[in-house]
Image: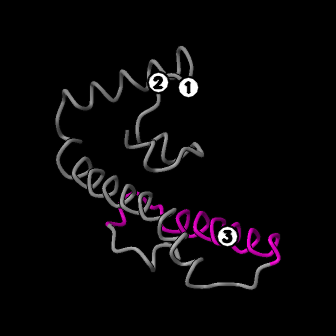
């Protein structure tokens, strides 16, 4: 669960958040089995958990690697910084929900990592 279970760059600071999300998914799977009156089938739970969480784990890994590139390469690129400032200006001026950077989506919304990267 969480950052101890993911070999990802730490540059998005999402390890704890991943852990909370994964516990929520795991509890949902356990609750579903209890509601159906079934005993806990850990093999089935593990397979379903893997199917549900793997895409998001891969996505946050990709996002973290990209963020590392931004921190090390793009922050010194004037055109990239200008683009970022334009997004921030549009977001503040018109609607924070219409103009969000990928970082803002990941940090400040409940949108999953797969959708945030798309």
State the image quarter where residue 80 is shown.
top left
Q: Residues within 10 Å of mark 1 (few under 14, many from 20)?
A: some
- Graded by Cα atoms within 10 Å as few (under 14), some (14 to 19) or many (20 or more), the crowding at tag 3 reads some
Label 2 belongs to which residue? Answer: 99
Q: How is the image coloured?
A: one colour
Q: Which residues are magenta?
A: 9-37
- Above or below, 24 against 30 in this view is above
Q: Could you tell me residue 110's position as x and y percent?
A: 60, 46
**Residue receiving disc 1:** 96
Q: Earlier in the sequence, mark 2 or mark 3?
A: 3
**Could you tell me which residue is drawn at 40 percent across and 74 percent down?**
6
Please tell me in which quadrant of the rendered image residue 48 appears: bottom right
- What is the secondary structure assignment of the residue under circle 1? loop
User: Which label number is shown at residue 13?
Assistant: none
Mark 2 touches mark 1? (CB < 8 Å): yes
Name the foreground residue: 37 vs 81: 37
Q: Is residue 16 magenta?
A: yes
User: How far apart are the alpha carbons under marks 2 and 1?
Assistant: 6 Å
Residue at 54% from the left image edge and 78% from the top image edge: 46
Count how many numbered circles sit on residues in the image: 3
- Residue 39 within the segment the image draws in magenta: no
Q: Mark 2 packing: few (<14 Cα in 10 Å), some, or many (20+)?
A: some
Name the image quarter holding the C terminus.
top left
User: Residue 70 in the image: x percent, y percent?
Assistant: 25, 47
Q: Is residue 91 left or right of 41 when viewed as pictured?
A: left
Residue at 53 percent of width and 21 percent of height: 92
- Mark 3 — residue? 29
- Please, what is the dominant secondary structure of the magenta stretch? helix
What's the distance in space between the residues labelled 2 and 3, CA to CA?
35 Å
- Label 3 and label 1: CA atoms lie apart by 34 Å
**Given contact means CB atoms under 8 Å apart, are the residues at marks 3 and 1 in contact?**
no
Give the answer, above or below, for where 1 lies relative to 75: below
């Amino acid at each position: 669960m969480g950052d101890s279970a993911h070999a990802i760059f730490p540059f998005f600071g999402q390890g704890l958040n991943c852990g909370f999300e994964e516990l929520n998914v795991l509890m949902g799977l356990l609750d579903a089995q209890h509601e159906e009156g079934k005993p806990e089938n850990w093999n089935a739970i593990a397979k379903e958990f893997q199917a549900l969480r793997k895409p998001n784990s891969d996505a946050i890994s990709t996002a973290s690697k990209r963020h590392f590139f931004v921190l090390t390469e793009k922050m010194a690129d004037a055109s990239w910084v200008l683009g970022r400032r334009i997004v921030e200006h549009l977001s503040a001026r018109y609607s924070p929900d219409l103009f969000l950077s990928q970082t803002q989506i990941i940090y400040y919304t409940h949108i999953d990592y797969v959708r945030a990267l798309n």
